[in-house]
Amino acid sequence: MNSTAFDDASSVAVANLLSLKGRRAVVTGGGQGLGKAIALRLAEAGADVLIGDLDGERARQAAGDVGDRYSGDVLGVDMDVTDSSSVAQAAVVAVAEFGGIDIWVNNAGIFPSVPVLETPDQTWDDVFAVNTRGVFNGSREAARHMSAQGHGGVIINIASTAGFTGTAPGLSAYVGSKHAVQGMTKQMALEFAPMGIRILGVAPTFVPTEGNMAAARLAGGPVQDMPVMAKNLIGRLGTPDDIARVVLFCASDLATIMTGSTLLADAGQTI
């Protein structure tokens, strides 16, 4: 039996359901790509946003870009998601500057492509440190602050279509890490519901972020010819903002009935 019931928003107008005015968000790996696109949409919806990134200068530059476009408070900080103390410090900054944390997006991730037989132990460990332990560190820290506030919040884990199926050769560590993110999302939903905390995953298809385009160049050939694009049914590449809009839905009160699931933002890739 839940000790905290989620609000029934049946009588709330759509514009108010979508608004994040007065809410405080943290986005990991937010200096570029999907993370920056997510920060932009959350800020547009009215949230104050803290952008964390391993490259602190890139985080601060992204925060400046977002802050120039929208009226809320936006900060950029150094954050290493593999280091629980670094994650905790970023959360402390968010609480000190914004007054709390209502939304936490675990977006940081890496995806080196190495065939199984050539994968060093360190590469495997690095992928799981960022993609899996990083999600755990962020979710745990977010839940600590959200539960202490007494009114819950929302945690969103950026998974991947690789969490549903195998993908291009060379990505065994990545695929394994993203399957793990799906499992954690389900389990944490069970543990966090009594605290009033929803947790959802979003599984994007390939989109042309800075990191993905660098990977495409290493693979050789045009990005539209990459194996991950073979089953795209929408007739175009997805964009970072395509994914950011799904994250905004998850963060908003439009999704109050949802927790524990992972939404496919996959352009039909996994059919």
Image (cartoon, rainbow, N blue to C red):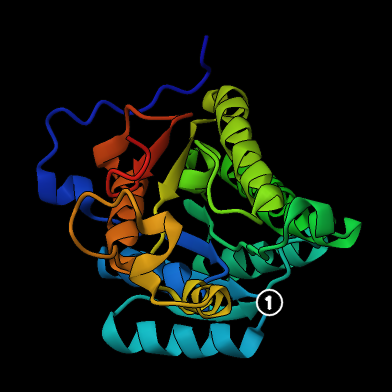
View extreme (right): residue: 121
The answer to whether residue 113 is above or below residue 36 is: above
Residue 114 position within the rendered picture, expressed as x and y whole percent measured from the top left: 72, 62
- Residue 21 shows up from this direction: no
Task: Tally the marks.
Answer: 1
Q: Is residue 184 left or right of residue 204?
A: right
Q: Is residue 142 left or right of residue 115?
A: left
The answer to whether residue 238 is above or below residue 196 is: below
In which quadrant of the rendered image does the C terminus lie? top left
- Quarter holding residue 23: bottom left
Residue 89 position within the rendered picture, expressed as x and y whole percent measured from the top left: 73, 67
Q: Is residue 147 left or right of residue 118?
A: left
Residue 8 position within the rendered picture, expressed as x and y whole percent measured from the top left: 26, 25
Q: Is residue 180 left or right of residue 7?
A: right
The residue at 27%/85% (across/down) is 69
State the SS at label 1. Answer: loop
The residue at 28%/52% (across/down) is 232
Q: Amino acid at mark 1?
A: Leu
Which of 203/154 is in front? Answer: 203
Residue 132 position within the rendered picture, expressed as x and y whole percent measured from the top left: 70, 48
- Quarter holding residue 207: bottom left
The residue at 11%/44% (across/down) is 14
View extreme (top): residue: 1
The residue at 56%/27% (across/down) is 186
- Mark 1 Cα shell of 10 Å, populated few (<14), some (14-19), many (≥20): some
Q: Which residue is mark 1?
A: 54
Which of 164/159 is in front? Answer: 164
Which of 106/101 is in front? Answer: 106
- Residue 103 shows up from this direction: yes
The answer to whether residue 265 is above or below residue 122 is: above
